[in-house]
Image (spheres, coloured by chain):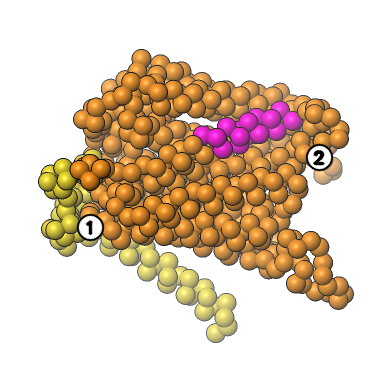
Chain colours: A orange, B yellow
């Protein structure tokens, strides 16, 4: 054993790869099911009226959003951190028993947290704040999990051999600090058992219930500062970290401009945190906050496109690789979808556009072209790149991967086009009125019109889920595929036919 | 001057400061091309491309700690 050469240790990375796939399947399956519930409401009671409470849209929706955001995506972020972190810092987890212990503890406490979230949300226990539904005991557990990840990040940096921190590490650190700050401030809450109501009642509610420390408009402001920046620091910043490592590595090309990556980083950090106000246009928050939210959202195009264009230009002169490798296809389409959704978002944040878009399905479409196209594809590509290296096997099937790519791309296109049409139709119908100012349509009129688009969205979801199951199968079979020599792994991932 | 006016001025000057700071940073990066230790910024891409545990770091944290071929075979 003593004579074994020093190697990177991917134990913790493998554990998080497993949860990325499992929680991805769970979250996306629930998503497809509730998409069809909207199209065919009878599905709410398909498993019988006695358990309808657990299968209704309202109960399942937070389970969908939380399992894809904090299950699939966070697991993907951590799987890649425990892989990329070691490699660009040139230090192995095997060199520190302490960091290995922290990494495993991080994983197992996360699993306990996930179990607590699933059970409590199924039971209907919620703070009712979107993407922050967890009650205070779970919040405390999540803070502990987060701190453990921080110990891993800064611990590994502390024992590194490479003095400079690669750009991906900057983005991982920003994820850690950003989410930490947002989560703490938005989840400031008082357990109801400790509170006294205005009329003097005490001992209110169950022990695990809580109320937000903020009220009214302030609560809304903090919530959307958090909500929008959860998009920033869970769906953008760490995914940029991934593409800055995996695309150059898989293609063997140096980043087009390292300098551009540095200034896009600072641009993104400065601008993103101010944009959350665009969720509260035409509400009771001060007008200048709304205007600021709009303006910063538009400025956000610059740093976002700075990173995305940097990635596309990295492939300069090497576009034949995009045609040849489905793995590169996933990453190039991911950065294209990144450009696309970071243009769409600012357009929706313009006040006059928002007057039509707000509360409609166009917003849902926007979120999903970002998450399915950018986040989903990038995490899938990252795991495909990692699999041959952590399992020391060639990827089971290139053909299956290519088929998955096209099926999922078709799924995304169906998803966002149907939601665009649905959203704009909805927005226009809500606003339509006759010459006396009477509304032209009732709410039910819009529901009837939207039915085909809801059904189409469900089909898009099924296609994406099908592709994800193909991905899971491909990774599973990779674990027993043909072993590869270490030297084959420099750049392009080895793939079976 | 009431607190709202002060906040407005503070916000304005902070924005100006950050805009000037960002543009100075861009100018600095592209004019110098290399950082204070003389490494061309573009060479930092090699941290991803040459990331085997035995590869030589772009900028080793110390000469002793840099893994060498011998280290790898140990």
Label 1 belongs to which residue?
A163
Can see residue A367? no
Say left or right for A16 vs A26: left
**Labels 2 and 1: the sequence-earlier one:** 2
Comparing A367 with A1, the one in front is A1
Question: Label 2's element?
Answer: helix
| Highlighted magenta segment, given as a residue range | A21-37
Q: Pointer 1 indicates a residue of which chain?
A: A
Quarter location, residue A412: top right
Q: Pointer 2 indicates a residue of which chain?
A: A
| Label 2 crowd bin: few (<14), some (14–19), many (20+), radius 10 Å | some
Q: Is residue A31 magenta?
A: yes
Cα separation, mark 2 vs mark 1, equals 55 Å
Quarter of the image for the C terminus of chain A: give it: top left
Which residue is located at x 76 percent, y 67 percent? A192
Label 2 belongs to which residue?
A53
| Label 1 crowd bin: few (<14), some (14–19), many (20+), radius 10 Å | some
Question: Label 1's element?
Answer: loop
Q: Is residue A373 magenta?
A: no
Q: Is residue A460 above or below residue A276?
A: above
Can see residue A483? yes
Which residue is located at x 72 percent, y 53 percent? A126
Could you tell me residue A308's position as x and y percent?
Answer: 37, 41
Could you tell me residue A168's position as x and y percent?
Answer: 34, 49
By secondary structure, the bulk of the magenta-drawn segment is best described as helix
Could you tell me residue A97's position as x and y percent?
Answer: 35, 55
Say left or right for A205 vs A393: right
Which residue is located at x 49 percent, y 36 percent? A18
Say left or right for A154 vs A163: right
Question: Marks 2 and 1: CB-CB under 8 Å?
Answer: no
Quarter of the image for the N terminus of chain A: give it: top left
């Amino acid at each position: 054993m003593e004579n074994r050469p020093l190697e990177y240790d991917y134990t913790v990375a493998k554990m998080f790869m497993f949860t990325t796939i499992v929680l991805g399947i769970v979250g996306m399956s629930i998503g497809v099911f509730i998409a069809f519930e909207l199209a065919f409401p009878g599905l709410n009671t398909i498993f019988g009226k006695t358990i309808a409470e657990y299968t209704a849209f309202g109960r399942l929706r937070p389970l969908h959003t939380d399992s894809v955001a904090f299950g699939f995506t966070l697991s993907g972020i951590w799987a890649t951190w425990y892989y990329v972190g070691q490699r660009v810092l040139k230090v192995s987890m095997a060199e520190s028993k302490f960091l290995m212990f922290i990494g495993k503890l991080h994983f197992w406490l996360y699993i306990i947290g996930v179990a607590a979230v699933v059970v409590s949300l199924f039971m209907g226990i919620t703070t009712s704040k979107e993407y922050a539904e967890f009650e205070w005991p779970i919040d405390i557990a999540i803070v502990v999990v987060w701190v453990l990840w921080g110990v891993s990040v800064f611990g590994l940096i502390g024992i590194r051999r490479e003095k400079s921190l690669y750009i991906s590490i900057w983005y991982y650190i920003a994820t850690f600090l950003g989410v930490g700050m947002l989560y703490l401030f938005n989840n400031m809450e008082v357990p109801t058992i400790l509170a006294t109501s205005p009329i003097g009642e005490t001992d209110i509610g169950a022990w695990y219930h809580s109320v937000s420390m903020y009220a009214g408009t302030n609560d809304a402001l903090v919530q959307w500062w958090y909500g929008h920046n959860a998009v920033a620091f869970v769906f953008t910043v760490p995914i940029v970290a991934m593409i800055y490592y995996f695309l150059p590595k898989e293609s063997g090309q140096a980043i087009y401009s390292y300098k551009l990556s540095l200034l896009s980083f600072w641009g993104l950090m400065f601008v993103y945190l101010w944009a959350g106000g665009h969720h509260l246009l035409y509400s009771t928050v001060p007008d200048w906050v709304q205007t600021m939210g709009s303006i910063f959202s538009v400025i956000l195009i610059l740093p976002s496109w700075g990173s995305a264009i940097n990635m596309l230009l990295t492939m300069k002169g090497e576009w034949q690789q995009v045609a040849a490798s489905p793995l590169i296809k996933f990453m190039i389409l991911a950065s294209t979808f990144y450009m696309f959704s970071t243009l769409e978002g600012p357009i929706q944040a313009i006040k006059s556009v928002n007057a039509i878009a707000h509360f409609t399905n166009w917003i849902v479409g926007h979120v999903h072209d970002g998450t399915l196209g950018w986040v989903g594809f990038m995490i899938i590509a990252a795991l495909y790149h990692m699999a041959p290296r952590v399992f020391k096997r060639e990827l089971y099937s290139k053909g299956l991967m290519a088929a998955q790519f096209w099926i999922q791309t078709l799924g995304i296109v169906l998803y966002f086009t149907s939601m665009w049409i649905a959203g704009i139709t909805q927005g226009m119908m809500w606003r339509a009125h006759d010459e006396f100012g009477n509304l032209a349509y009732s709410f039910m009129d819009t529901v009837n019109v939207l039915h085909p688009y809801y059904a189409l969205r469900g089909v898009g979801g099924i296609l994406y889920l099908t592709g994800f199951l193909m991905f899971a199968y491909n990774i599973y079979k990779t674990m027993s595929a043909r072993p590869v020599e270490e030297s084959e792994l420099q750049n392009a991932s080895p793939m079976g036919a | 001057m009431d607190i709202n006016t002060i906040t407005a001025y503070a916000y304005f000057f902070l924005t100006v400061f950050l805009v000037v700071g960002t543009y100075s940073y861009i100018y600095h990066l592209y004019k110098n091309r290399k950082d204070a230790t003389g490494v061309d910024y573009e060479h930092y891409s090699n941290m991803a491309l040459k990331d085997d545990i035995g590869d030589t770091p772009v900028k080793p944290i110390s000469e002793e700690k840099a893994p060498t071929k011998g280290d790898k075979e140990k």
